[in-house]
Amino acid sequence: MRPSPVPDWPALGVVGLGGAVGTSLRAGLAELIGSSPSGLPWATATANLAGALLLGLILGWSAAPGCRTGGHRLIRLGVGTGLMGALTTYSTLIGETLHLIGRGRAALGVVYLLGSLIAGLALAGLGLRLSGLLERAHRADTTDGAGAGTARPESA
């Protein structure tokens, strides 16, 4: 696949807009949560774990039939790549882990790092699972109950 000589301006625009919103959300979350007396960086953990769950949902949704092109593609790029990419911050996770270790809190640093990674994977999996359940529920609502694929009347 050859790169296009013309930039995909709509895609770049939604990724940039999503990134601006995600960065603002992360900064607001850090301000809201503030510093922890224990030294555990709760704001970063919260952003990363919420982002993992939402990325799982987005990935599952975008894999559904009919969600891979057009406007769905732009939503996936804006929310998944832009917003979630800016909200989550794994470079900060590593920096904070090293900071904890450097302050003599190696056990807390290791628990923070491994806990974040394991919980993030679990939440991403949960998001994928939830998106599948939501998709099946949506399909069940739009069929006649016999799985024939016909739409239900609006009054049903």
Image: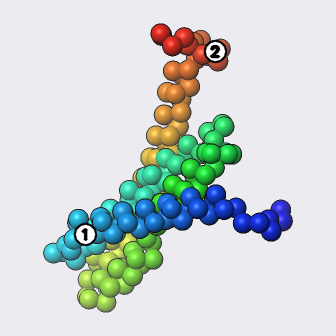
User: Would you place residue 21 above or below residue 99 in this image?
Assistant: above
The residue that appears at 66% across and 62% down in the rendered structure is 9
Lower sequence index among marks 1 and 2 = 1
Can you see residue 120? no
Quarter occupied by the N terminus: bottom right
The residue that appears at 35% across and 79% down in the rendered structure is 97
Q: Position of residue 99 (x, y in %)?
A: 32, 85
Q: Position of residue 39 (x, y in %)?
A: 22, 77
Mark 1: amino acid: Glu
User: Would you place residue 89 above or below residue 1 in this image?
Assistant: below
Mark 2: amino acid: Thr
Q: In this image, 27 relative to 126: left or right?
A: left
Front-lying residue, 116 or 153: 153
Q: Position of residue 22 (x, y in %)?
A: 43, 63
Q: Position of residue 55 (x, y in %)?
A: 49, 54
Residue 69 in which image quadrant: top right
Task: Tell me the residue that label 2 is attached to.
Answer: 150
Task: Tell me the residue that label 1 is attached to.
Answer: 31
Can you see residue 95? yes
The residue that appears at 48% across and 10% down in the rendered structure is 156
Q: In this image, 105 relative to 125: left or right?
A: left
